[in-house]
């Protein structure tokens, strides 16, 4: 992960028309020029190519992420978006969001395939876990801790618990990396892993999750939709 921290991710889910999305990109680019970390916007798959062009035309520093990618490499899989098809357009992909696990029956084995496809395509996975014990595939450097009870409910985890979970996750990631990985990557230290928190993040609670550095960013759903709200979250994360 070479991008600067904190990492603040807008997961727009299946929201916004292209016109709304285009305006959102303009407003966020205008309002966040001095943000010291990395802003990643994850639009619905169909807007990825246009969002990429739009960000280039705005000379924006926002990075693009996918909300998901296919478990299949390519071929006869109607409706799927393969990692190789969006490589070069996105830098990141959210993999294993609880909404995908619940609504699309994504199992741990399927998620391993998705992670491998992302890595092969040069896309960095943002791997979502729902608790400290959720299985994590090898080679993951960025984890989003997203307890299901907190997603879209207005009922966030406590910063204390989220920090404790983050610490456990970083130790697990470091331990996983000591198993020789397929890519033979250099081993990272515990402090090199990034854990972001997601679940009812608001402009008011962002700071409490990020202070002291155990949590390195936020994954924001509902409160990313209104650009002014999201700018406030970025300001408190800065
Ligand atoms: P929320 O969603 O901010 O609406 O709770 C977070 C997420 O689903 O990633």
Image (tube, rainbow, N blue to C red):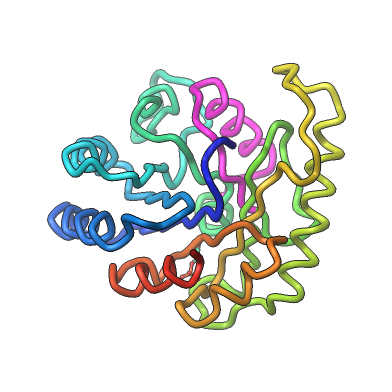
Residue 70: x %, y % from top left = 47, 33
Count the labels in the image. Answer: 0
**Residue 118 colored in magenta in the image:** yes
Q: Residue at x 62, y 67 (%)?
A: 210
Viewer-side residue, 231 vs 35 = 35
- What is the span of residues highlighted in magenta in the rendered image? 105-128
Q: From what the image shows, is residue 238 above or below residue 83?
A: below
Viewer-side residue, 40 vs 44 = 40
User: In the drawing, does residue 114 fall left or right of residue 232?
Assistant: right
Q: From what the image shows, is residue 204 above or below residue 12?
A: below
Quadrant for the N terminus, please. Answer: top right
Residue 74, image quadrant: top left
Q: From what the image shows, is residue 38 above or below residue 77?
A: below
Viewer-side residue, 44 vs 34 = 34
User: In the drawing, does residue 50 fall left or right of residue 219?
Assistant: left
Residue 88, image quadrant: top left
Q: Residue at x 75, y 23 (%)?
A: 186
Residue 57, image quadrant: top left
Residue 231: x %, y % from top left = 35, 68
**Residue 56 colored in magenta in the image:** no
Q: Residue at x 54, y 26 (%)?
A: 117
Residue 140: x %, y % from top left = 67, 37
| The residue positioned farthest toward the left in the image shown | 19
Q: Residue at x 61, y 55 (%)?
A: 144
Residue 95: x %, y % from top left = 55, 44
């Amino acid at each position: 992960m070479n991008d600067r921290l904190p990492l603040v991710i807008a997961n727009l889910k299946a929201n916004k028309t292209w016109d709304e999305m285009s305006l959102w990109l303009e407003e966020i680019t205008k309002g966040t020029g001095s943000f010291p970390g990395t802003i990643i916007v994850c639009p619905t798959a169909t807007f990825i190519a246009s969002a990429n062009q739009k960000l280039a035309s705005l000379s924006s520093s926002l990075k693009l992420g996918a909300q998901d990618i296919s478990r299949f490499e390519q071929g006869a899989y109607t409706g799927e978006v393969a990692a190789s098809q969006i490589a070069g357009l996105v830098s990141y992909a959210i993999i294993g969001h609880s909404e995908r696990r619940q609504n699309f029956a994504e199992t741990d084995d399927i998620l391993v395939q998705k992670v491998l496809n992302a890595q092969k395509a040069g896309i960095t996975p943002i791997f979502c876990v729902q608790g400290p014990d959720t299985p994590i595939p090898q080679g993951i450097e960025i984890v989003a801790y997203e307890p299901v009870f907190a997603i879209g409910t207005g009922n966030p985890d406590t910063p204390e618990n989220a920090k404790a979970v983050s610490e456990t996750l970083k130790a697990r990631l470091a331990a996983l990396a000591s198993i020789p990985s397929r890519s033979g990557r250099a081993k990272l230290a515990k402090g090199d892993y990034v854990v972001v928190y997601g679940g009812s993040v608001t402009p008011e609670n962002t700071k409490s999750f990020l202070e002291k550095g155990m949590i390195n960013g936020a994954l924001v759903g509902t409160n990313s939709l209104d650009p002014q709200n999201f700018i406030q979250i970025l300001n408190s994360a800065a």
